[in-house]
Amino acid sequence: MLVLQAFKDAIPSTWKSASWLLQLMIPISLAVTLLKYFGVLAWLAQYLNPLFVHLGLPGSSAVIFISGAAAGTYAGLAAMMSVELTLREATILGIMIALCHALPMECTVNKKTGSSFWGMAVIRLIAAFLCAYLLNMWLAPNDTPYIYVGASADSTLSEVIYTWIWSQVKMAAMVFAIIYLLMVVQKLIEMFHLMQKLTRLFAPLMTLFGLPQNVAYMWLVGNVLGLSYGSAVMLELEEKGMISREEADAVNYHLIMNHSLLEDTIVLASTGIPALLLVAVRIGFATVIVWLRRGFQTLFHQ
């Protein structure tokens, strides 16, 4: 009975969240489609290719990365599907966006819990470009086409618009399905009081990640429900004196690389990007950054 109730209760929150996301995704998708049709992406590519070629990406992909970095994972995904890419290029771009998305909003959230706005932004940008450079050296060649929802190159403007409208209908259905699944999982976690049990299970991992064990709950909330929810929990625990400002700051260094792990992985993997690689890269970068920070703190406090 509780399970059925979770499926029912997830509908209103799914509608609210998916509607908000589509209001963001659809204009970005249209903008990228028109920029491509009128040759702006091709013009931009000739100037950015010298940089992006070292990342295994065409210069036009800069628009995709900027969309994700400024507005979020879903915005980046909408832009990715509006440009012809190979699966290899999409994998590199998708992981870049997973590491570095929604910077204005999420860095503001980090600042509220004691971290530097610009510090968080710079770390994420550096990590995204470093990761892309390394992936370009490591990933095997793969010319398999990625999902492309646009029109063919010789299409008229009316054909481009018609194809775009139909693609948005399909994209909206995908977004609603994914968000609904995530909302059901969230409701089930709440109904069966699983968060505390999961927290105890993940506590030993915190030592491996270079974090205090008592921040396991914040880490789990950030990974299951997102950075905004995670920051709200941090602020509440700080106010109650259950964690220090320094501990909250330490968790931020991990969560900037690795938050909403469940949602982002499902969303990107559903389009063909390897889930295992996505998870491994995010957790790996998060762990390295936390341990580097601890090393620098030890070095400069001696």
Image (spheres, rainbow, N blue to C red):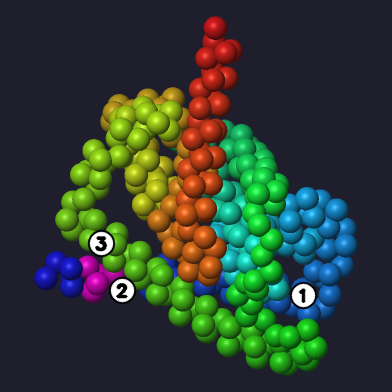
Residue for point 56% across, 81% down: 168
Residue on which disc 3 sits: 187
**Residue 146 seen in this snapshot:** yes
Residue on which disc 2 sits: 11
Q: Distance between the residues labelled 1 and 3?
A: 41 Å
Q: Is the magenta stretch mostly helix, strand or loop?
A: helix
Q: Relative to 238, is 33 above or below?
A: below
> Is there CB contact under 8 Å for labels 2 and 3?
no
Sequence-wise, which precedes: disc 1 or disc 3?
Answer: 1
Residue on which disc 1 sits: 36
| The magenta stretch spans residue 168 | no
**Element under label 3?**
helix
Q: Relative to 70, is 233 above or below?
A: above
Residue for point 49% across, 78% down: 172
Residue 270 screen position, x and y as percent: 48, 69
The N terminus sits in image quarter: bottom left
**Element under label 2?**
helix
Which residue is at the far left?
A: 1
Q: Is residue 129 left or right of residue 54?
A: left
Q: Which mark is residue 277?
A: none
Foreground of the two, 61 or 162: 61
Residue for point 70% across, 73% down: 84
Residue for point 82% across, 78% down: 38
**Element under label 1?**
helix
Q: How far apart are marks 2 and 1 (CA)?
A: 36 Å
Residue 294 screen position, x and y as percent: 51, 22
Foreground of the two, 265 or 171: 265
What span is in magenta? 6-10
